[in-house]
Image: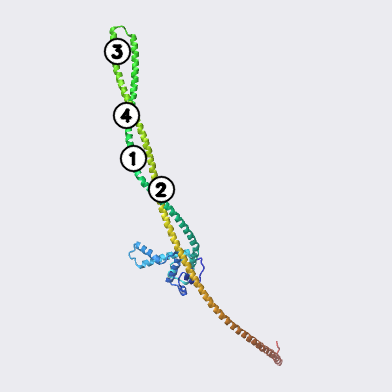
Amino acid sequence: MGAKGTYSLMSIPDIIDSLGVWGLTVEEDRLLRPTSEFVEFVFCACLAQVTGINREDLIEPAQESLAASSIEDKDTLYLSALTHNLLCYHLTRFANAARVDDFSAYDISRPTKDRTLLLLSAFINFVKFTEQLCNPFVNELASRSDALLVERDQISSQLAQIQRRIQELKAKRDQDEPLCQEFRAKNKQLGDLVLQTKVSQQAVMQEVDLLKEEKTKLMERKEHIQRELEAVSDANKRIKGRIVQSPERVKRSISTMSVNRVEYKKTVAINEAKTRDLQAKINALVIIEQDLRTCIDQLSVVEKEMKSLQDMQKDLAELKDQLDDKKIERNELRLKQERVAKQLENAHAKLALTQQRAADKKAANERINERLQAEYEHMDEERKENDLHLTEVRKEASEVEEKMSEHLKSSEEELNNLLKEYWSLKALTNVYMETLAAKLNMKMS
């Protein structure tokens, strides 16, 4: 089963050098024959370079999970198994980020050489890739940190101004508190007085209405009496015109008219008394009306005072709301300041970690340069020795070539002599064959 990563396969020396940069000393034999403990250790080191998570960091969450569970026997077996599961979960996420989609716990428990090299190549290349992205991120983080520091100073100055303003408002509120209490008491008294005045006003208005109705009735009765008087006077005139000069009748008429006059006088006296009563009541009503106008003026003044008091209470409520808003804003600014400080602390920590990694990388590069320099010097010495050996070999080759040329010359001479002997023997053989054929009466083909 091969890893489906997008990184190229690294050689064993490159893997050893890359792990050495992180301070991990790994032998080649352990990569050729990996064990589960070694693979878990190296994978955890790669995971810690990116996420900062170690196996020790997972023990406490595992203990808390076991403590919160309903398992009665919480022995080390459950703890180690849960820690191993958490580690496999984080390694699987790390492998997915490194484009290794088929990572499993089998790669830790039963590691193989090819599989371990493929996974380490993917992990190391992914870590290098993330480290290459750290420099612009750290620069951006530093710029953001400077901006946040400037913003923090501005917010601190604004917070100081707001706190001073709040203190001034509190002092002003404390100064105005006795006046407010006095206004509240006065407002309560005026409210009670207004209620009492309204009650008395309602009673007076009812009495005024009754008096007005009675006055109207009396006026109507007065008009009726005047009309009756006019009718009586007219009747009297007519009666005078028809009076018969009879003493007895005149006496009777006089006596009747005297009785009527007395009754009319009594009625007029009663009406005048009622008129005087009505006039006194009207004068009393005028006085009451003046008192009512005075009360109305006082009520308008009271309403103005109540309105001003309500405006002051409204302003006080608005000031309280502004104070609450400023408190909320101050808490938000404090939380924002804490977040900024935490981000700055994290940025400093990441910057220190990046600088530490850069220093480790630089030291590793220096060690690699020193090793390469030593190898170069060793190779230079070997080259010099090879040059000397090559000179000797060239001398030997020239000697061998000379010997070969002499040998070739002697061989050619021997070959020429052999060819001469061959052709002479062949000619003699042909003569012998022809002679033999002639003697045997045979034909030569």
Give the amino acid at mark 1.
Lys
- Judging from the image, what secondary structure is the residue with disc 1 in? helix
What separation in Å lies between label 4 and label 3 (alpha carbons)? 41 Å
Q: Are marks 2 and 4 in contact (CB under 8 Å)?
A: no
Q: Name the residue under label 2.
A: 322
Q: In which quarter of the image is residue 230?
A: top left
Give the amino acid at mark 4.
Glu
> Few, some or many C-alpha atoms within 10 Å of disc 3 (few <14, some 14-19, many ≥20)?
some
Q: Do the residues labelled 1 and 4 touch (CB within 8 Å)?
A: no
Q: Are marks 1 and 2 in contact (CB under 8 Å)?
A: no
Vertical position of residue 137 compared to residue 410: above or below: above
Q: Nearer the viewer, mark 1 or mark 4?
A: 1
Q: Nearer the viewer, mark 1 or mark 2?
A: 1
Q: Name the residue under label 4.
A: 207
Q: Mark 3 points at which residue?
A: 257
Labels 2 and 4: the sequence-earlier one: 4
Give the amino acid at mark 2.
Gln
Question: Looking at the picture, how far across and down is residue 88, in whole percent?
Answer: 42, 66
Vertical position of residue 251 compared to residue 46: above or below: above
